[in-house]
Amino acid sequence: MMDLHCHILPGLDDGAADPGISLEMAAMAASSGVTHIFATPHCNTRNVQQNFHSPALIRAYTDLQDAVDEAGIPVKILSGAEVLARGHFEDHLAAGDFMTLNGSRYLLLEFYFDEDPAYMEQCLRAVEAEGLVPVVAHPERYYCVQRAPMLAQQWADDGRVLQLNKGSLLGDLGEEAYVTAALLLRRRAVSVIASDAHHFLHRTPHFGALLNCLAQRFPEADPELLLYENPLKIAKDQTL
């Protein structure tokens, strides 16, 4: 399996605070069958490091991979960022400041939970105008989608990629998120499920409970497609 969304880079956001936690997360992910982790630190947020494309950020991925290899953990670290659409988002987008997923055309994009859907659409179109494909992080957590799930369905119909959080399907992120995630999954609007992990004790990168959940509650879902084939195509910059 491949985890498309994980806050495993140490000391860059509210995820892993130090390399030790990063290694615990990598080992936990590997123990559940994850072979590749897209390291996606928060980007363009308030009051934290901006995490724009830079030599220092690229070194952070390399340093983590070196540490994972030295620890003997069979996981590959891929580059990326979870970009918040706020502030001078379109200016930074045009300047190429954002790390795409493994250097592909796919950009992992998040919004404030209470964001206006008109602004969301404006940002999605701005991403596409730059020749990129927006990957909408956890659409089930946005209040406008919870109120009107067909908004996210339309995004999917328009070629935007929807990435659910495993925690939403497990019921860890609230009833509204669960209901919305379940609906989108059953409507086949979802392309990827990822951990959005921040630690090894809570919001973890372990996929065992998710696999059980899919088998028991969502037998119509295709774990191979959602957890491997589509993330692999994104990593290879292929069309889903």
Image: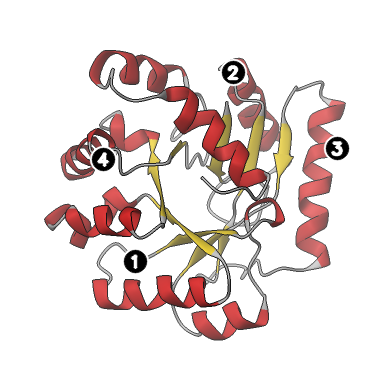
The image's mark for residue 66 is: 3
Residue 215, image x and y in percent? 33, 14
Dot in front, 2 or 1:
2
N-term-proximal mark, 4 vs 1: 1
Amino acid identity at mark 3 = Asp
The residue identified by callout 4 is 181
Q: Secondary structure at mark 4?
A: helix
* For the residues bearing labels 1 and 3, Cβ distance under 8 angstroms: no
* Dot 1 crowding, Cα within 10 Å, few <14, some 14–19, many 20+: few
Check disc 3 and report its element: helix, strand or loop: helix
In this figure, which residue is indicated by the disc labeled 1?
112
Between the residue at mark 2 and the residue at mark 4, the CA separation in whole angstroms equals 23 Å
Amino acid of disc 4: Ala
The structure residue drawn at horizontal position 61% and vertical position 16%, both measured from the top left corner, is: 31
Q: Residues within 10 Å of mark 4 (few under 14, many from 20)?
A: many
Residue to which mark 2 is pinned: 33
Whichever of callouts 2 and 1 sits on the residue coming sooner in the sequence is 2
Q: CA distance from mark 4 to mark 1?
A: 17 Å
Q: Position of residue 54 (x, y in %)?
A: 77, 68
| Residue for point 62% across, 68% down | 49
Are discs 2 and 1 less than 8 Å apart at CB?
A: no
Is 46 placed above or below 22 here? below
